[in-house]
Amino acid sequence: MLRVRPSGGREQECGERYDDQLVAAQRTGHWGILDVFSDGGADDAGTSAARAQYGWCVGGTDPERFEMWAAGGGRVEGPPQDMDSNRAELRAAIAVLYRVREWEGEVRVWIDNLNVLRGLKRVAEGAQPADLMEFADQQAEQQDGSAVTEMVGALGWVRCSQDRDLWEVAIKLVGECKGRLEMRWQRGHQDKHRAL
């Protein structure tokens, strides 16, 4: 199915298999662990020609093999100056969370962007926007400049993120998800030398 977004961005999605599995789980009450994956990227970040895109998939519940139940992707909304990998990754996570919000079992969300992962993990663990802002303020007082940069990207979005619009949507979606969310880090192509 093709969805047209109010912002004019288009998202392509296929997902009949997920819909069938959701109906079956609702009927039987048997919910497996659902693995979902999201990714995003930006080209020419920091320039007036910047653009970003994202993709996601719902991988099914079989621990022995990957089954694609649904997938989608599209262009990230927003002005070029806001386009970077954090925005693209967050937009991807929002899309997949929206898709699986009705799943009542455990949902493992695999993300390769540590900034987005840390923020979503804190929200899934119950942190409220005011808590995140307070935590960011405390950390900023205690850290040097490089640590503050990492911390602000991960947690301080309330006060200074250009992606605040997306974080507000993500927080709402996390609260609407019927299943238990578990955020997990997936090694990305840029992390080939990073230890797990």
Image (cartoon, rainbow, N blue to C red):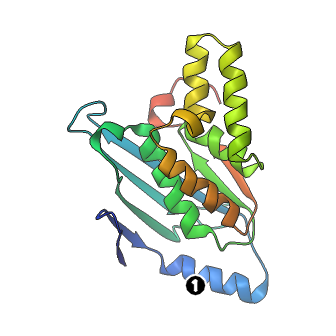
Quadrant housing residue 181 = bottom right
Most extreme residue toward the top is: 144
Q: Position of residue 10 (x, y in %)?
A: 31, 66
Q: Residue drawn at (46%, 52%), measured in percent from left and top?
A: 91
Which of 196 and 4 lies nearest the eye of the viewer? 4
Most extreme residue toward the bottom is: 27
Write down the residue under mark 1: 20
Which of 67 and 119 lies nearest the eye of the viewer? 119
Q: Residue drawn at (75%, 68%), measured in percent from left and top?
A: 105
183 relative to 98 in the view: left or right: right
Total labels: the figure holds: 1
Which of 110 and 74 lies nearest the eye of the viewer? 74
36 relative to 54 in the view: left or right: right
Q: Position of residue 23 (x, y in %)?
A: 64, 86
In the image, residue 190 above or below residue 96? above
Q: Position of residue 141 (x, y in %)?
A: 69, 16
Q: Residue drawn at (74%, 72%), measured in percent from left and top?
A: 104
Q: Residue drawn at (44%, 39%), measured in percent from left and top?
A: 162
59 relative to 2 in the view: left or right: right
Quadrant housing residue 7 = bottom left
118 relative to 51 in the view: left or right: right
Quarter of the image where the N terminus is located: bottom left
Quadrant housing residue 147 = top right
In the image, residue 178 above or below residue 43? below
Q: Position of residue 138 (x, y in %)?
A: 73, 23
Residue 165 seen in the current view: yes
Mark 1 belongs to which amino acid?
Answer: Asp
Quarter of the image where the C terminus is located: top right
In the image, residue 190 above or below residue 116? above
Disc 1 is placed on an element classified as: helix
